[in-house]
Amino acid sequence: MLSVENLSRKEQVIRKAAELFREYGYAATSMRDLANALGIEAASLYSHIRSKEEILQSLCFGMADLFRDSLNKVEAMDISFSEKLRRGITGHIQVMAKDLIASAVFMNEHRHLSQPYLRDFLLLRINYINRFKKIIEGGIASDEFRKIDTKLAVMTLFSSLNWMPNWYDPSGIINPSDLGNQLADMLIDGLKNK
Amino acid sequence: MLSVENLSRKEQVIRKAAELFREYGYAATSMRDLANALGIEAASLYSHIRSKEEILQSLCFGMADLFRDSLNKVEAMDISFSEKLRRGITGHIQVMAKDLIASAVFMNEHRHLSQPYLRDFLLLRINYINRFKKIIEGGIASDEFRKIDTKLAVMTLFSSLNWMPNWYDPSGIINPSDLGNQLADMLIDGLKNK
DNA sequence: CCTACCGATCGGTAGG
DNA sequence: CCTACCGATCGGTAGG
């Protein structure tokens, strides 16, 4: 049933869908738009995928898995909280940089998931955010960080991370690893000249 | 033609539309959804507005005007660059806090504008961002800020600002003015304990 | 603000 | 991967 060729074609369908979802949004992208971009008829898409939403699910939960795996590794390290935060940031950005299109869909289109997928997705996200919050709280408790509002801090962090697919130019000078470190510098050290 | 009552009803239509656009997205909100939420028939909406997109235009450009006015005032002040940045941030957040729903639509749905409106909108946005960038560049030139990548800095700033409508709870403890100052503290001073 | 309606398009299925 | 097609829904108009 699932030959290599079928999987490969399914992957192509999902990739092209991700491009269109990113550019026009999930709701504004029709299956006919997708079929047309692939050079086939709309009905033919259903040989590869079960529904339009299945594509979105695949993209959203696929990215969620990668983000979680990245954070798992960081949490397992025996390093300071500020170093954990830095590695959490660079890890998140590395994951995004490997698929900026899917990352943008993950961020902007997940709300079009139907239940119970939407609920599951939001639970994964809040869990991920809370793990970063714990790192920041740990850093405050150990005096590495100032006593700032941790909700504000973690939301600022996530804003910065999640907006990146909307402006980062992978063909530009800065590579993802440097970008992650510079973002970590900025959030940890601030703009001010000491 | 434009009696007070008509204007008022038009405002109601736009407000309700903003709520639905925020919750479900522009493309996934039908005129029938909107009519239903208002307790009228879909066709009746067109007594108040010319098209679905006109509503989106009104929301997006209305917010853009408010943001621009806020920054105009800050730029006219004779204060340091770091103080300009702080007031730019608090001003932006005050504008958003006055209409979190329209702010969310402004941020997430503007891409559904058709040409030439989309082009105009994006020009307004890049202009606004560049004015913040100039403030940061001024702060670096005057040694108030470190020599960071200004594009990264301004994008981080905008990420933080624009994501706020998605998590800020106006019924919570923190008021918009304090939120703006805390966000400014965080971006200017960083997380690190000195 | 309503009834009645338009042409276009939607996601998806049947059957090959 | 195709042709042929389904019922539902879309934004919007005519005319009152």
Image (tube, coloured by chain):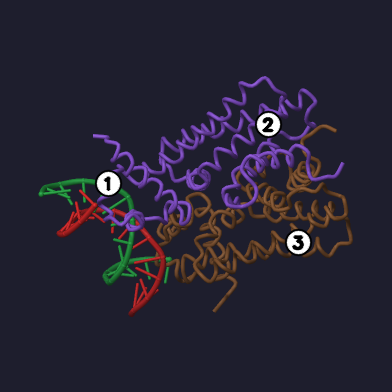
Chain colours: A brown, B purple, C red, D green
Mark closest to the chain's N terminus, 2 or 1 = 1
> Label 2, label 1: how many angstroms apart (C-alpha)?
43 Å
Name the chain under label 3.
Answer: A
Residue at x-position 46% and y-position 33%: B120
Could you confirm whether marks 3 and 1 are on the same chain? no
* Count of numbered circles in the view: 3
Residue at x-position 54% and y-position 79%: A1
Which residue matches tag 1? B46
The x and y percentages for residue B147 are 79, 31
Name the chain under label 1.
Answer: B
Number of other residues with Cα within 10 Å of mark 2, as a class: few under 14, some 14 to 19, many 20 or more: many
Secondary structure beneath label 2: helix
Number of other residues with Cα within 10 Å of mark 1, as a class: few under 14, some 14 to 19, many 20 or more: few
Marks 2/3 in contact by CB < 8 Å: the verdict is: no
The x and y percentages for residue A162 are 64, 51
Mark 2: amino acid: Leu
Residue at x-position 36% and y-position 57%: B37
Between B172 and D7, the residue placed more toward the observer is: B172
Which of the labelled discs sits on residue A71, or is there none? 3
> Label 2, label 3: how many angstroms apart (C-alpha)?
33 Å
Mark 1: amino acid: Tyr
Name the chain under label 2.
Answer: B
Instruction: Using residue A155 as the reference point, say whether residue B65 is left or right of it.
Output: left
Instruction: Using residue B192 as the reference point, say whether residue B10 is left or right of it.
Output: left
Which of the labelled discs sits on residue B85, or is there none? 2
Q: Nearer the viewer, mark 2 or mark 3?
A: 2
Mark 3: amino acid: Leu
